[in-house]
Image (cartoon, grey):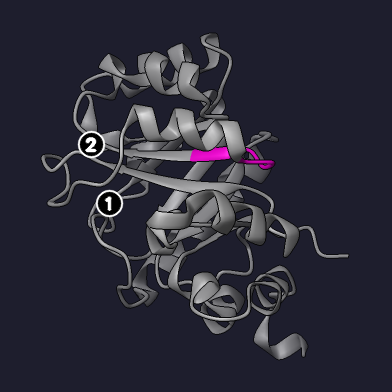
Amino acid sequence: MSSKLVAPSILSADFANLEREIKAVAQAGADWIHVDVMDGHFVPNITIGIPVVKSLKKVSPLPLDVHLMIDDPEKYAEQFIKAGADYLTIHVESTKDPAAVLKSIRSFGAKAGITLRPRTSVDKVLSLLPLCDLVLVMTVEPGFGGQSFMHDQVAKIATLRREISNKNLNCLIEVDGGINAETAQICHEADVFVAGSYVFGQDYSKAISALKEAKLPSSK
């Protein structure tokens, strides 16, 4: 049995029927529900906020994996956690003191995550890994769904895997952006796959199973 976790991104779901969509992907074998929060400032798009997370928590049988693409996440972390975020991920570029925000996320009872834009060096997050339960590698520019996979970001996954292993840390590696059955194989060192259009654009069970079975292409 594969140890890969799959977190469908509701950014690609039917927003008029989110409860139905969430329960459908849960039944199809998903492990988490990925929620992209964008503020129109840190990224050039606006999605959902605290009230929607609170509503999702009431109907989701799966943990909520909330990715904050917002400025000053320290102002809102506690509110998102109270609303129901089980995992709360912040961008290293979004705050002057990411370490303090990560510590506060844990103090409020959630799992803490760190991420970075594709153009940001992975070195920016390495010292923060002991404060994290999750590190997210973006393989597209954050802000919009449906973008093409950026192959040059895969090296970050290998660097993180080496760092986590060397320091014996309990930190999951998540990858988000253009993930499908083929790109998941390229990212085989990751633990968690976020997928939006790939999951919601076809048979949910088939898509999720393909991601869970991701392995080195040469090992087929």
Q: Secondary structure at mark 2?
A: helix
Q: Are marks 1 and 2 in contact (CB under 8 Å)?
A: yes
Residue on which disc 1 sits: 117
Please identify the dominant SS of the magenta region: loop
SS type, badge 1: loop
Q: Is residue 146 left or right of residue 114?
A: left
Question: Which residue is nearer to you in this view: 70 or 100?
Answer: 70
Query: Is residue 84 within the magenta segment?
Result: no
- Please give the label number shown on residue 210: none
Residue type at mark 2 is: Glu
Q: Residue at x 69, y 79 (%)?
A: 206
Q: Tell whether 68 sits left or right of 89.
A: left
Q: Which residues are magenta?
A: 60-65
State the quadrant of the N terminus. bottom right
Q: 203 or 111, which lies in front?
A: 203
Which residue is denoted by mark 2 in the rendering? 93
